[in-house]
Amino acid sequence: MFLVEGKTCTGIASYLKSQHIKTPTGKSTNWTKNTVNSILTNEKYMVRTWNAKGRGKVDNKTAIQSVKGIGPAGLNYLFMLAGDPDRCKPDVHIHRFIYDDIGVNVSDEQCQILLTDVVKLLKYEYPNLTVRSLDSIIWNKYQIGNKKKLEGCLHEL
């Protein structure tokens, strides 16, 4: 429901408050975006799902990817929306950016590794840069058809 509607952690928190749903502590209905983010990104929150061996506990990543149509890119995008700063969604724009720069087609996993490495290299000069923000900058530039080098784009951070 929330993903289809494009809800952010803040939007989910607002909805849960409006429905008077208690937080995990059970003491209040004062949901915050941080509480929602913590739930969505914390592997300690286990979910139950059916798997080939029967019913058992699995981590959120495994449960989400068990949904038909949710692959690694969709999972990364979900965690990005939940606020994880260390993930990218390797879509066509990210792949095209990497190909334009190094002339090689790479896997989704390699996209994640490359963007993570780039952020590490640029972190000193751009301390607020994250994999998520770099993904967003690349996506926005390619989405509007501006395939020029991204020089000067990091000032957005």
Image (cartoon, rainbow, N blue to C red):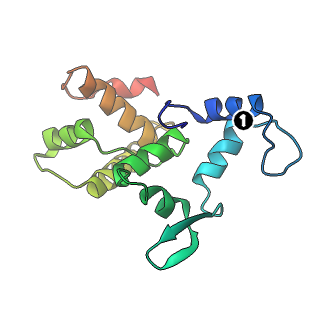
| Residue 123 visible from this viewpoint | no
Question: Foreground: 117 or 111?
Answer: 111
Where residue 136 appears, as percent x and y from the top left, is 38, 32
Q: Is residue 54 above or below residue 90?
A: below
Where residue 98 appears, as percent x and y from the top left, is 20, 43
Residue 145's quadrant in the figure? top left
Left or right, 21 with reference to 60: right
Question: Foreground: 12 or 114?
Answer: 12
User: Which residue is the site of mark 1?
Assistant: 16
Residue 71's quadrant in the figure? bottom left
Left or right, 79 with reference to 155: right
Q: Give amino acid for label 1.
A: Leu
Structural crowding at the residue carrying mark 1, measured as other residues with C-alpha within 10 Å and reported as few (<14), some (14–19) or many (≥20): some
Mark 1 lies on a secondary structure that is helix
Q: Residue furthest left?
A: 103
Left or right, 90 with reference to 85: left
Q: Quadrant of the N terminus?
A: top right
Query: At 50% across and 61% down in the image, what residue appears?
Result: 63
Where residue 107 appears, as percent x and y from the top left, is 22, 55
Where residue 122 appears, as percent x and y from the top left, is 39, 42
